[in-house]
Amino acid sequence: MRRVLLPRLRAEDGSTPFSLLWLALLILVAGIAVDVTNAYRNLQLMRDTADAASHAGVVAIANDATDAAVVEQVRATVERNMPAAVYGALFQDPVQDIRLANYDPATGALSDFGERNAVTVSLHRTRALGNPVGTFLLRIAALVDPNTRLDAWEVRADSTTAFTDTQRCASHNYLYAAGEIDLTSSNAFGSRYCVHAQDEIWMSQQNSFGSDAGLSMPDLANCGTKCSDAANPGSEAAAHESNLLLDSVDSQIGTTLADFLSNGPLHAAFFADKPISGDLSVLGPAIDPATATPGQVVQLSRSEFEALPEVPGGLVYDVFCGNGNKGLSISQPATGSFSDVAIITDCGLEFSGTTDITSSLFLSTKVSSNASLTAKQGARIGSSTATCQPDAVSFVMAKGSMHAPADFFGSNVAVMLGGDVNLAATSSSTTLNHVGLSLIADGDMHIAASHTFTSCALPPGGLTPRLRVIRHVAPTSGSYTLAAN
């Protein structure tokens, strides 16, 4: 080694200084690379922490937490990921850096109007906070000239997460089960109709999915080999992983029940365009026609309700069964149909025959190990025309399960169950086309063969639950009030 280096050091041709210059340049470049890499590593850590914190805040919003609780959840998540004892204080402004707002997925804007469904988190490492990201070689330049400010990097990371409607299945019509969905064979799901299970979807064969249809679950691996066009045509394009969040039917029933019996905002919106109609005299002393107002609550026993020759519209019927062991027969009135009414009962619901229902609500609070919503052979729930009518959608809610025969037919109606859904198979030569039918269950769903589900392709509305997801977003603009910390 000495024989190699000594001649070069004694050389007078200038190669040694030139080599040392290159060596210095290489060290400088390597040092800058180290400083830049270190800054990027810290920035990425801050981004990941901001993402985790904004996500945690939105999860708290989805669970109906207060603003103060949301902010506390954000702070706790930041502390877990980047402890202040190691990284220093990351919030430059305790108010500005945790923001709650409304995110509009259509425009991408944040605003102070509407429900708070988004959380924005900003994290900082700055000189003002006393925790900038220090440099190594670049610090030498700072020693030579302090004005370079190269002794440290100032880094900021922002993240916004929103609890918003799903874009893949932004439809009024869908099958949703908090448990699993079992599909046997020869069922068809039309364009923009969505099928989702929070657990898994099991399919036999020859179930078909139209264009823009949705077939989703949190983990597609649970679909096995059945999410293939060879087994179920159209399923490959329809299948996707998604974690769709929906309030439980049981909680929705509780909220709707309390609201409708106390003239709440849901009640007001429901009856906003529903005047009283029909012959009020059939209700006897239960109501005074001279003072009746739209949305007024009429209390009737089960026998009194079933004896009505017609059901006047524009009213809430509070029907009681006493111990709730019996079912309330819902069949076509002698005159007219069920239109613009809300029927709330502690009885089970028994739909029989052809029942024409338009723009109405049926709600059962009966809790039973057996089904609290049943249908007889040939029963139909919903519109008699089997067409999409945006202003005539009806809603059926029951705390228990639903059992329906093979020839049950639903149209322009959303059916929500606190238990399971069991829909029997039709004969091999018959296919029932459910137009605008949604089925939502807190439990499992079993759909036997030969049912066709056609979507009305309407946006969610009325009392239909919104399918929502938690996702990171990039707001385009907007000004909004900031959360108090």
Image: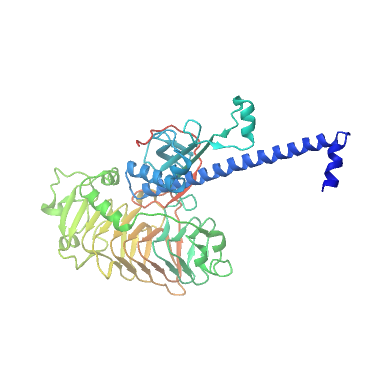
> What residue appears at the point 55 percent right and 43 percent down from the top-left corner?
42
Q: Position of residue 472 (x, y in %)?
A: 49, 46
Specify whether 413 is left or right of 193.
Answer: left
Depicted 93 relative to depicted 264: above or below: above
Residue 16 sits in quarter: top right
Q: Position of residue 481 (x, y in %)?
A: 38, 33
> What residue appears at the point 45 percent right and 60 percent down from the top-left corner?
196
Nearer to the camera, 336 or 205? 205
Specify whether 35 is left or right of 258.
Answer: right
> What residue appears at the point 53 percent right and 69 percent down from the top-left corner?
226
- Asked if residue 352 can be seen in this view, the reply is no
Specify whether 181 is left or right of 32.
Answer: left
Nearer to the camera, 271 or 461? 461
Q: Position of residue 368 (x, y in %)?
A: 25, 68
> What residue appears at the point 41 percent right and 38 percent down from the top-left corner?
98
Depicted 164 relative to depicted 373: above or below: above
